Image: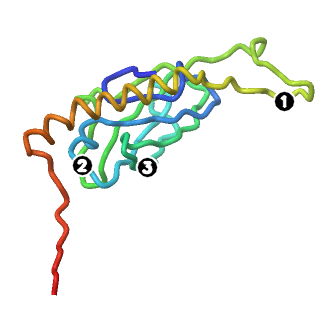
Amino acid sequence: MELTKNIFFNTDKLVANTTVKVSYTGKLFQDEAEEVFIHYGFGLQWDNVSDVKMEKTDLGFQAEINLDDSECLNFCFNDGNGNWDNNDNNNYTFAIESIPTALILQDDMGIESRPRLRRSYIISKKIRIAIYKIITYLPKIISGNYKRKLTNTNNE
């Protein structure tokens, strides 16, 4: 689910007491930050505040968050060097839905089962990210403005 530009979740909606993967391709990723942290809390008062270092991948920075039984998830991003992406001082805020216990499926042993993501959803998410990468970096490569890491090759 893409709720705002450059932030993706691995699920269609945020549900209380579940784990969600957050993918970030925003300003700090585009500025090629080496590491990014997600600073998050729950509810209007930012309860249970946590900072998690996100994993850097070719598709952006990613982290898993355990969702609280609260009305909303609030978060922002920083690179550990004082640079923040906080949605122009508004922070990123998303509603968390509660599932009535009558709708929770249980198997024969009484264990709750979590719904799985549709394969088509995962594939469409990967295609969107690939298209974003092509649109962002192909013009830079063609024009020669793409920053390359220079390697020092001393042949003695």
From the viewer's side, name the closer residue of 49 and 126.
126
Mark 2 to mark 1: distance in Å? 43 Å
Q: x%, y% of residue 136?
A: 21, 33
- Residue 55 has which mark? 3
Q: Nearer the viewer, mark 2 or mark 1?
A: 2
In the picture of the structure, the residue carrying the numbered disc 2 is 32
Q: Position of residue 112 (x, y in %)?
A: 79, 27
Query: In the image, what residue type sits under mark 3?
Result: Glu
In three-dimensional space, the C-alpha distance between marks 1 and 3, rounded to whole angstroms, equals 31 Å
The local secondary structure at tag 1 comes to loop
Q: Is residue 56 above or below residue 109?
A: below
Residue at the (43%, 49%) spot, across then down:
55
Q: What x and y, as percent, mark residue 133?
A: 28, 34
Is 128 in front, or is 109?
A: 128
Q: Is there CB contact under 8 Å for labels 1 and 3?
A: no
Name the residue furthest bottom. 156
Does residue 46 lie above or below 62 as drawn?
above
Of the numbered discs 2 and 1, the one sitting upstream in the chain is: 2
Report the residue at 57% width, 25% height from top: 70
Crowdedness near tag 3: few (<14), some (14–19) or many (≥20) residues, C-alpha within 10 Å: some
Which of the numbered marks, if any, corresponds to residue 111? 1
Q: Amino acid at mark 1?
A: Ile
Which badge, 2 or 3, comes first in the chain's sequence? 2
